[in-house]
Structures are given as structure tokens and as C-alpha cells.
Image (cartoon, coloured by chain):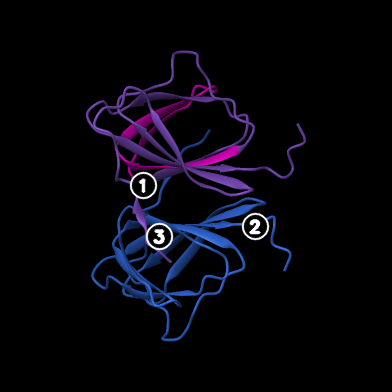
Chain colours: A purple, B blue
């Protein structure tokens, strides 16, 4: 066993675009770090993912919007499951600090699409 | 979309034993919250898991020990992958505050045991 890494390390001082990094890729799940600083989805740009995504905010603040018009304010520690094909977008992230997300993309065995 | 939960909420004020709660169970992965307060594995009590485990400390401090004698100090934000059958134990957790872990137990498709 060699050591551990910090989810808060190696964040570039400039973030022209949202930073997405795969921390671990397993056959059935992918664990990803996302770092935002004021980034948001373009208006009317909706994620419509084939897989369930379990996501937690570890630092910073964000707001998710859903196609059913629900809006979710999230801060450090807040998590939720975004089911496959639940259309959503990142409406806002804190422009004054890095928002660090941990996202777990879960392969759905039962998906036959 | 109904809302999100906080990983730091609903921690009992007394923790006679380590608290393990499944936050999400998918066919191929299980996401678990573990809360420790001074808890540790019994001496010579080693975890030897059939699945890979990706784990991150979200609050508090902990020390993991491995069968190869490696010792790992972990604090908030530190993460690692513990491969299947990598024998390890929780050597120490902070007795003065809750240590909150997020553990992702990953089914290994290639495991034929």
C-alpha cells in the first residue's frame, strides 16, 4: 500500500473550464472529481445521462436545476442520486471559491437501451 | 427531484459502536457512510474484503494499517483505493470528534472466486 491522495490537492489556480478527472475507473463504476469556479451549464443545456450518478459537494456551493423545475442548493456535505435520464443542469457554482464535487457514475445492469 | 441530504447530518450524539449506513445500493456498487469516534479495529482483526473499496475521509482523522506494515494517516479529503484482499485494519480514529468516511464498495466483474 503506497499512500493516499487528497481530493483538495492539485487544483490549478486558473480554471478556464470546469475540471473533470477520473480518480478511479472500475468495470462497473467510475469515480470522478469535478472542480468548478463559477462555471455553470449553458442555458437550456441539459445533462441526460444513461447511468445513475451519485454526487456529493465536498467544498464550495452549487445550485442544480432539474427539468421538472426543481432547484437544489447544495453546500459541502450535500449529496443526492441523480437517476439515469433525469435531465438536469448546473445552474450556478460559487464564483469566489472552488466547488469540489465527487461524482460516482454507476453502471446500470438493468439498462437495456 | 425531491432534494438532497447532508453526509454530516443525523449523527447520534453517542456512538457506542462504529456507525455504518448504506446511502445507496446499486447492482454493481454500494455507497456507505461510516462514522467513527475513537473506534478502531481490534488488534489482529484484519479486513480481507472480496471487493475493491474506494474510501475517503470527509471529516476527522484516522489511521489505517496494512498487513505489509504500511501505516496511513488520513484527514479530511484524503482518499485511496483498497484493493480486494488487501488486508487492512482501522488502527485509530480521532477520539475527540466524529470521523466521517465515505466508502464505495465496488463489485469486481472479473472476480471468479
Residues A93 and B5: in front is A93
| Residue A84 on image: x %, y % | 62, 34
Residue drawn at the location 69% of the way across and 62% of the way down? B111
Image quarter of the C terminus of chain A: top right
Q: Observer-nearest residue: A7 or A106?
A: A7
User: Which numbered marker is on residue B108?
Assistant: 2
Q: What is the spatial separation of the Cα atoms under label 3 and label 2, in whole angstroms?
A: 21 Å
- Residue under circle 3? B101
Secondary structure of the residue carrying tag 3 is strand
A94 w.r.t. A52: above or below: above
Within 10 Å of disc 3 (Cα), the crowding (few <14, some 14-19, many 20+) is many
Sooner in the amino-acid sequence: mark 3 or mark 2 = 3
Q: Which chain is indicated by disc 2?
A: B
Residue A103: give x, y in percent of width and height.
Answer: 47, 41
Cα separation, mark 3 vs mark 1, equals 11 Å
**Cα distance, mark 1 to mark 2?**
28 Å
> In the image, residue B93 lies at what x, y percent?
32, 71
Using the rendered image, report if marks 1 and 2 lie on a common chain.
Answer: no
Residue found at x 44% / y 68%: B19
Q: Are marks 3 and 2 in contact (CB under 8 Å)?
A: no
**Residue B60 spot, x, y in % from top left:** 28, 62
Give me the disc on residue A77.
1
Quarter that holds the N terminus of chain A = bottom left
Q: Which residues are magenta?
A: A52-76
Amino acid at each position: 500500500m503506497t499512500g493516499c491522495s487528497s481530493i483538495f490537492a492539485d487544483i490549478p489556480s486558473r480554471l478556464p473550464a470546469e475540471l473533470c478527472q477520473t480518480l478511479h475507473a472500475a468495470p462497473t463504476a467510475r469515480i470522478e472529481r469535478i472542480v468548478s469556479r463559477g462555471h455553470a451549464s449553458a442555458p437550456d443545456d441539459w445533462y441526460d445521462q444513461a447511468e445513475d450518478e451519485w454526487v456529493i459537494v465536498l467544498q464550495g456551493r452549487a445550485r442544480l436545476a432539474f427539468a421538472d423545475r426543481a432547484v437544489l442548493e447544495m453546500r459541502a456535505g450535500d449529496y443526492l442520486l441523480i437517476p439515469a435520464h433525469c435531465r438536469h443542469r448546473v445552474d450556478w457554482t460559487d464564483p469566489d471559491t472552488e466547488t469540489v464535487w465527487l461524482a460516482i457514475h454507476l453502471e446500470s445492469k438493468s439498462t437495456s437501451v
